Image (tube, rainbow, N blue to C red):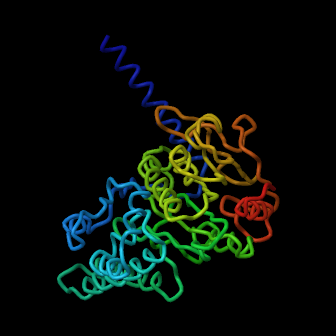
């Protein structure tokens, strides 16, 4: 009996190893991935928030209160009370799904300045190794860039590699809203890099915002720990499972704040996150591009009422990744395949894996129509 069990485990190990090698081979040219620790739970400062009784009542717990409950609480506060919460708990308010949008912008601007000051102190601390001081200077520069005049930061989490969400347009007045969910290798440092811009959250969001002729507000959401390179993190759903509740709660927060149900655009590994979040995410449309799979066999498995769309370019290397789910490796059926049941998005003139939001492509034209509630 023990021998048979050992042989079964050995076969599973060999199968997993073979699949992992196939996944890596199918994406030749990408660096090997490093295993990441997922950032979950509320941001730092929650203990002080929970202990704050200045208003004479308990503040909503960021870990347990629903976005609808948070929104209802904030509607009872005066302008002075709102200002006091931002001054005392900027980082918490800025990331509290369901809080008023304008208040979150204000809170995150303050939180970015506070975190920048911390990093500048680290950069000047001669007791730290030189590489740590340099990293602190880089972080401080990123925070300064994000807090530049006119940027609307709806979420900011300095933990780990850093997470952020930025809004383009007037989300409080827009009749249509879109959310961009990126794939691997995205964090605070690469959120708005200039290289391969249409593979970044800001590049995709700006392009979609322009394609809608500014008639839809667009949110670049990099609010989960993404895989780095190709490796076990990219081949499994572990980070997607950790990030999905954050995405679902973020979209629930938009709904609680009074915005229309968004079209959610999910690129590459971001589509794995969207597949996990779908049952709890109040979206009007769910659009995947360059997807390795969504963890389900078909649209029905997503458990969503959203219209589901899929785009995959002919020369996208993601097509070389096996659409399997074996011992936790792989992400299942191809959403762009005929048996999945998603509506097809045209991909003429799309170049490679990160060209779906590039101006002039059929996919971007279709994305804009979807974002505006039309059916291409």
Badge count: 0
Direction from residue 162 to residue 319 in the image, left or right: right
In this rendered view, identify the residue nearer to me: 45 or 141: 45
* Residue at the image point whose x is 62% and y is 44% from the top: 321
Q: Position of residue 162 (x, y in %)?
A: 40, 68
Quarter of the image where the N terminus is located: top left
124 to 295, vertically: above or below: below
Relative image position of residue 348 (x, y in whole percent): 82, 58
Is residue 200 depicted above or below 233 in this figure? below
Quarter of the image where one finds residue 297: top right
Where does residue 170 sit, x and y in percent of width and height?
60, 76
Q: Pick out the residue farthest to the top.
A: 1
Residue 310 point in image, percent of width and height = 70, 49
- Seen from the viewer's position, the closer of residues 190 and 93 is 93
Task: Please give left or right for residue 159 compared with residue 364 in the image.
Answer: left
46 in relation to 32, above or below:
below
Q: For this rendering, which residue is in front, 78 or 64?
A: 78
Q: Quadrant of the C terminus?
A: bottom right
Q: In the rendered view, tell whether residue 81 sits above or below residue 198.
A: below
* Residue that appears at 50% across and 41% down: 20
| Nearest to the observer: residue 84 or residue 13 | 84
Q: Is residue 367 left or right of residue 18?
A: right
């Amino acid at each position: 009996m023990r021998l048979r069990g050992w042989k079964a485990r050995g076969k599973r190990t060999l199968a997993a190893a073979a699949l992992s090698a196939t996944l890596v081979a199918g994406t030749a040219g990408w660096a090997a991935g490093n295993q990441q620790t997922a950032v979950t739970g509320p941001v730092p400062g929650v203990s002080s928030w929970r202990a704050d009784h200045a208003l004479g009542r308990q503040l909503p717990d960021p870990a347990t209160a629903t976005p609808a409950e948070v929104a209802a609480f904030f509607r009872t506060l005066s302008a002075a009370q709102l200002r006091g919460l931002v001054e005392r708990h900027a980082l918490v308010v800025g990331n509290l799904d369901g809080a008023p949008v304008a208040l979150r912008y204000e809170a995150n601007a303050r939180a970015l300045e506070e975190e920048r000051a911390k990093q500048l102190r680290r950069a000047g601390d001669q007791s730290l190794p030189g590489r740590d001081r340099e990293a602190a200077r880089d972080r401080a520069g990123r925070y300064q860039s994000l807090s530049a005049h006119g940027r609307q930061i709806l979420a900011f989490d300095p933990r780990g590699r850093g997470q952020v969400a930025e809004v383009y347009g007037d989300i409080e007045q827009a009749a249509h809203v879109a959310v961009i969910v990126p794939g691997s290798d995205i964090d605070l440092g690469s959120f708005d890099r200039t290289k391969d811009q249409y593979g970044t959250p800001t590049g995709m969001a700006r392009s979609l915002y322009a394609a809608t002729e500014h008639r839809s507000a667009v949110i670049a959401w990099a609010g989960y720990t993404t895989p780095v390179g190709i490796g076990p993190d990219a081949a499994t759903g572990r980070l997607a499972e950790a990030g999905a509740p954050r995405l679902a709660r973020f979209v629930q927060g938009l709904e609680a704040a009074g915005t229309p149900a968004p079209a959610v655009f999910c690129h590459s590994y971001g589509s794995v996150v969207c597949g996990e979040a779908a049952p709890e995410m109040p979206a009007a449309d769910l659009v995947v591009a360059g997807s390795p799979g969504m963890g389900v066999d078909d649209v029905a498995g997503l458990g969503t009422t959203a219209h589901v769309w899929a785009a995959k370019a002919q020369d996208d290397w993601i097509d070389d990744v096996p659409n399997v789910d074996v011992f936790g490796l792989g992400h299942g059926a191809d959403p762009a395949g005929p048996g999945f049941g998603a509506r097809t998005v045209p991909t003429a003139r799309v170049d490679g894996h990160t060209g779906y939001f590039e101006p002039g492509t059929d996919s971007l034209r279709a994305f804009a129509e979807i974002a505006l509630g039309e059916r291409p």
